[in-house]
Amino acid sequence: MNILLLGSGGRESAFAWKIAQSKKCENLFIAPGNAGTGQYGTNCDVKVNDFEGIKQLALSKHINLVLVGPEEPLVKGIHDFFLADEQLKHIPVVGPQSEGAQLEGSKDFSKQFMVRHNIPAAASKTFTKDTLKEGSEYLTTIGLPIVLKADGLAAGKGVLICTSIEEAQQELKEMLTEAKFGDASSKVVVEQFLQGIELSVFVMTDGSHYKILPEAKDYKRIGEGDTGLNTGGMGSVSPVPFADAAFIKKVEERVIIPTVEGLKKENIPYKGFIFIGLMNCNGEPWVIEYNCRMGDPETESVMMRLESDFVDLLSGVADGNLNEKELIISPKTAATVVMVAGGYPGEYLKDKVITGIENVRDSQVFHAGTYLDGEDIKTSGGRVLAVTTLQDDMFTALQQATADASRIYYDAMYFRKDIGFDLL
Ligand code: AMP
């Protein structure tokens, strides 16, 4: 098969690494990719939202399957674009059509979906600028802290956790009437705060059948001990010790089955990944959010534990026979440490030369924000590299990933040295 992978981050590097191992993959193209993805296939200079450019690429490279990494092209309808085009409609796309992508693209849609299908989630109501007054009253009734969520995509920044009623009322006003998050906050979900430990569960579905991929825990804050500003993700670990078989069974029965069945009942076609962000509250799973794609840096750890042929699974999603495919997961522990640029998640340094990748001993180095400048690999993004290892036990995995990250150097590099140590 000729496969086209859309995206350029650590998630796509891990996908590309895994796809390239499959005998079923003849040629892999990554659009646009980064300095690392070129090891696994051919980078093509086309952006993920350039649908016409993607069309030309898919036709000229005789693509047989498209895998979409990030959410934006899905929410904008890349899959619908393929289905509506005579020349492209025979090419399967892994990733939902825009309607299914609303599970991530609209928090209001996803909350209503959860209510309709009795999926456990925090109590909430949605408000617009016309109902600001009702919103300001509602938030006094749900206890502190108060969670405010911009309805639309806001690059991971649209959720605020407010510790006082006054702060929540002020923020709600700014979101609704001053477009604090642009169009994304023209609707705001006001939600009760869930107390517990977070984890993510990933599902692959062909619209009828599903497979549960390894769960993972990610670390969002920039500082050690989960302090400081939120980031795109500083590390991940899989498996998650507290997500034992009994807990995952609850997730399957109360969340995964009603989600897949709910999509089917509502005639929402869905071929792709469902990322379920969960809060474990005293052993009970509550849904925080859905994403319509895999997470980053969870994908790096998940792909490391996947022993099955990933292309075979992707074909199962495309062909609707995922139930006939075998999912084999390594019992070992995968740990990912993300290396970021100096200044991140604020304004950050770029164009720094990266050295020492060859000194890494027992980890995969997945590139995220990197580019090639002649012979040099340089930094381009806030999250630069993801260092992922697979080891027999969690302690060794955490130590190895951290030790290998420290073998790499660029000016003002930073990574957390405590990823996963809270789980030991
Ligand atoms: P989301 O974009 O919905 O994943 O929200 C971002 C982050 O905000 C989550 O990863 C949680 O840490 C936090 N969060 C969102 N909703 C809630 C909630 N109802 N209770 C507690 N924390 C939440």
Image: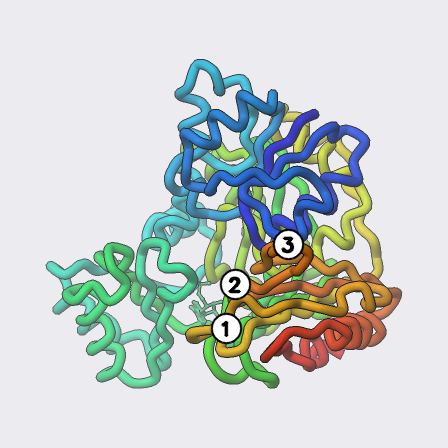
Labels 1, 2: front one: 1
Tell me if I can see residue 253 in this picture: no
Q: Position of residue 398 (x, y in %)?
A: 77, 74
Decide if ligand 1 comes within 8 Å of the CB at mark 3: no
What is the CA distance from the residue labelled 2 to the residue labelled 3?
18 Å
Ligand 1 within 8 Å of the CB at mark 2: no
Instruction: Tell me the quadrant of the picture where the N terminus can be found.
Output: top right
Q: Which residue is nearer to you in this view: 33 or 294?
A: 33
- Residue that badge 3 annotates: 374
Residue at 65%, 38% in the rendered image: 42
Identity, as a three-letter code, of the amino acid under mark 2: Gly
Mark 1, residue position: 349
Residue at 56% across / 25% down in the picture? 92
Residue closest to the eye, 414 or 184: 414
Residue at the front extreme? Answer: 374
Residue 261 spot, x, y in % from top left: 52, 37
Quadrant in which ligand 1 is drawn: bottom left
| Amino acid tagged 3 | Gly
Amino acid type, label 1: Leu
Crowd class of label 3 (few under 14; some 14 to 19; many from 20; radius 10 Å)? few
Label 2: state its secondary structure. loop
Q: Is residue 38 above or below residue 168?
A: above
Question: Comparing marks 3 and 1, which lies closer to the viewer?
Answer: 3
Q: Residue at x 68, y 56 (%)?
A: 375
Q: Earlier in the sequence, mark 1 or mark 2?
A: 1
Q: Mark 3 or mark 1: which comes first in sequence? A: 1
Q: Secondary structure at mark 1?
A: loop
Q: Please give the residue where the numbered disc 2 appears in the rendered image.
A: 381
Image-quadrant location for residue 278: bottom right
Q: CA distance from mark 3 to mark 1?
A: 20 Å
